Amino acid sequence: MPLFSCGINYQSAPIHIRERLAFNASQIKAELPHLCQLEAVNEAVLLSTCNRTEIYMAGAHAQGLQQWFQQRSRAANIPIELHYYQHQADDAVRHLLRVSSGLDSMVLGEPQIFGQIKQAYRLACEAGAAGPELQQLFPAVFAATKTIRQETQIGAHSLSMAYAVVQTAKRIFTHLQNCCVLLIGAGELIELMMTHLKDQHLRQIMVANRTWSKAQQLAQSIGGIGIRIGDIPAYLSQIDIVITATSSQLPIIGKGLVETTIKMKKRRPILMIDLAVPRDIEPEVGQLADIYLYNIDDLREIIEANLKNRRQAAQQAEQWVALQAAHYLRQRHITHVSDIITQFRRQAEQHRDNSVQKALSEFQQGRDPQDIIHQLAHQLTNKILHQPTQTLRQLAYQQQDEALLLAKKLLLAE
């Protein structure tokens, strides 16, 4: 069954396009059954991150998926044709391997995408959307990704989003140890930020979340303070750096709130880094004086400046991707051939069992054993050879010479 991958990513679409086609975990669960009802879509995995929304599928063709993207883009007033891409068969496998190993990431070699793909696959399995083809593909990709990261230096050099955030903060604040930072959210990215920022010995770290107990739990792990998202206005004037990465569909921080905060801070600057898609901070906030607002795309310049070592490692990793993709594709062909062999053997065994059962019945009726055995051998040979014989005649009639030569090689021992 053909494999396909299609969608948009940070290279094909800017953030204001990606955020309109982003899905959180609950939306993915709800969407997967609809995807599998599309024309020619047998199986599907939906991956949605800050940098991409992609569908990996097994089916006859991907026209249904393209129409799915077009319908959602029309609803969001997006010219999806300018941003949509599609890979098929071997190219789809190689693309998934490049994504999983971090070679297709904004931050080259970043490891978070591996976990995000595993989660997307798990959601597809739970929804019954991942069938035999994808259940073979994704575990093989996970194993290959681990090999690629072990055998290359693609993830060895510090080049995470957290690193880029710290470098941005150091451009604005001379002494980070005098700063108070507010982290909004409770996902994996926020936890990574917490770990990285803890080493900077900041004056205070606050964590805001809709669930106060979750905010408290995260904050206490690094000696910080947990607050509710609804209490942010009361604390914002104490904050020097805001980092937000939630799955909210609407902005959490608006221009009006920040204008009021700036007056209270007496024009002391605030660095605001919005890592969410859709965005958590209204873009208009960036127009205010003394506000330094960066979104996930704005960090690319900082990240690009630190890519030399990883680019060298990426060349080696690309070779490993090619090797692992080729290995998987060969194994896939072997599996498909194994299915054919299994069906052929099952068919032959059924003919055998039927013939033996008939012969035993005739033994009980007292017929000559020698006649029964000859008849058994004759009938069994005819049944097994009937379909190959018919196929050979059809190939000859259609002048399929290459297929005939291959059949001769398969059927006739040298």
Image (tube, helix red, strand yellow):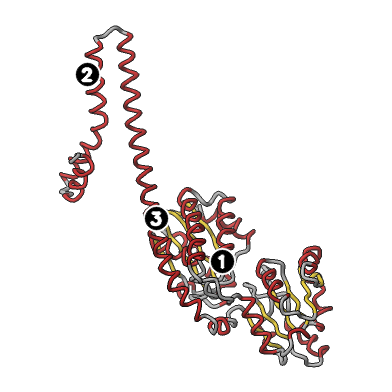
**Which type of secondary structure does the marked residue at label 1 adopt?**
helix
Pointer 3 or 1: first along the chain: 3
Q: CA distance from mark 2 to mark 3?
A: 46 Å
Q: Amino acid at mark 1?
A: Ile
Q: Quadrant of the C terminus?
A: top left
- Cβ atoms at labels 3 and 1 below 8 Å apart: no
Where is 297 relative to 410, above or below?
A: below
Total tally of numbered discs in the picture: 3
Q: In the visual, does 29 lie left or right of 412?
A: right
Front disc: 3 or 1: 1
**Residue 291 percent coordinates (x, y):** 71, 88
Q: Amino acid at mark 2?
A: His
Q: Secondary structure at mark 2?
A: helix
x 22%, y 13%: residue: 370
Q: Please name which of the two marks, 2 or 3, marks the residue nearer to the observer.
A: 2
Tag shown at residue 113? 1
Residue at which label 3 appears: 2
The disc, 2 or 3, on the residue closer to the chain's N-terminal end is: 3
Estimate the x, y position of residue 115 in percent, counting from the top left.
59, 62
Closest to the observer, 163 or 298: 163
Which x, y percent locates residue 311? Answer: 47, 77
Which residue occupies 52% across, 51% down? 130
Task: Give the residue type at disc 3.
Answer: Pro
**Left or right of 9 in this view: 321:** left
- In the picture of the structure, the residue carrying the numbered disc 2 is 374
The residue at the far top in this view is 366
